[in-house]
Image: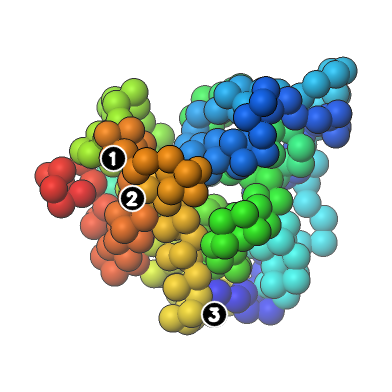
Amino acid sequence: MSFNDDARIDSSKVRRRGRGRTTGIAAGGTGIVAIIVVALVNQFTGVDLSGLVGGSTGGSPEQIAAAPLEGCTTGADANASIDCRMAGAADSLDTYWTAEAPTLGLGDYATPDFFLFTSSVDTGCGGATSATGPFYCPPDRALYVDTDFFDQLREQYGASAGPLAQMYVVGHEWGHHIQQLTGAFDRADRTATGPGSDTIRLEVQADCYAGAWVGAASTVEDDAGTTFLEPVTDAQIADALDAAAAVGDDRIQEASGGRVDSDSWTHGSAEQRQRWFDTGRAGGPAACDTFSVPTDRL
């Protein structure tokens, strides 16, 4: 999915934040493969799992204050730069959810914070490193994304990581923010695992919300009435679906060399994540009530 070159992008919704470069990550004997697996297990959650593979070693790097993005004002900028693409996606998503939130009973929609970071960052959910992967932190009501993750997803797991796949990640995390506003986070039992668990229902609902935005994205307009994005192509949809499948619990377990154990799942299978993305794309947010679906249809 490409931006219209003359679309106007409000880049103020995304800022860069983080720490100075740390001296390294202590894997505690688990190795880089384990770090990547933890990144993917943590993908699309609001919980920091980086402690499972160790933190930074040596020194206490200074926290860098959040800084606005520069040079991200048009759709052409979003097509040329991944940081600007994140800003463009945020502007489109915010415009979309401002209009759609009332359909979910949200009378008071609020824009989440959105931070890009490199290396590591402190959040209300704990300290995160690049190995943590993109996530939403409920206490901060903020998205955190290290864009290097997209390279990692492609190089280590062979998943597509084109522009729409990247924006699907943002759409998913934005979906978690919608869950925060609707109270779904508070109502859910986020400690349970396995088929039918609330954790899986939260994750596939966020996939559904991402799909709902993608389905309408080519109609969402900037302040001047220009659509942010061009119509999506079948190849771009396949790219996003490939990324959704790559972070399915079964794919992660297979990639780690372990046994596929559905009782330990927290995010849903590759098939579930793809199916709920398509459900949202076809039916919009109203089709995303994953909590009323029987387990055998989840």
- Which amino acid lies under the numbered mark 1 shown in the image of this protein? Ser
- Which amino acid lies under the numbered mark 2 shown in the image of this protein? Ser
How did the renderer colour the structure? rainbow
Viewer-proximal residue among 18 and 217: 18
Which residue is located at x 85 percent, y 23 percent?
61
Given this view, does label 3 or label 2 mark the residue nearer the observer?
A: 2
Q: Is residue 212 above or below residue 61?
A: below
State which tag comes first along the sequence, 3 or 1.
3
Viewer-proximal residue among 17 and 166: 166
The secondary element bearing badge 3 is classed as loop
Q: Quadrant of the N terminus?
A: bottom right
Does the rendering let one see residue 11?
Answer: no
State which tag comes first along the sequence, 3 or 2.
3
Real-space Cα separation, disc 1 to disc 2, in angstroms: 8 Å
Q: Are marks 1 and 2 in contact (CB under 8 Å)?
A: yes
| Position in image of residue 3 (x %, y %) | 62, 74
The residue to which callout 3 is attached is 230
| Position in image of residue 84 (x %, y %) | 72, 61
Question: In the drawing, what numbered circle is on residue 152?
Answer: none
The secondary element bearing badge 2 is classed as loop
Which residue is located at x 54 percent, y 53 percent?
170
Does the rendering let one see residue 69?
Answer: yes
Viewer-proximal residue among 252 and 89: 252
The residue to which callout 2 is attached is 269
The residue to which callout 1 is attached is 262
- Which amino acid lies under the numbered mark 3 shown in the image of this protein? Glu
78 with respect to 258 (left or right): right
Q: Are marks 3 and 1 in contact (CB under 8 Å)?
A: no
The secondary element bearing badge 1 is classed as helix
Which residue is located at x 34 percent, y 43 percent?
260
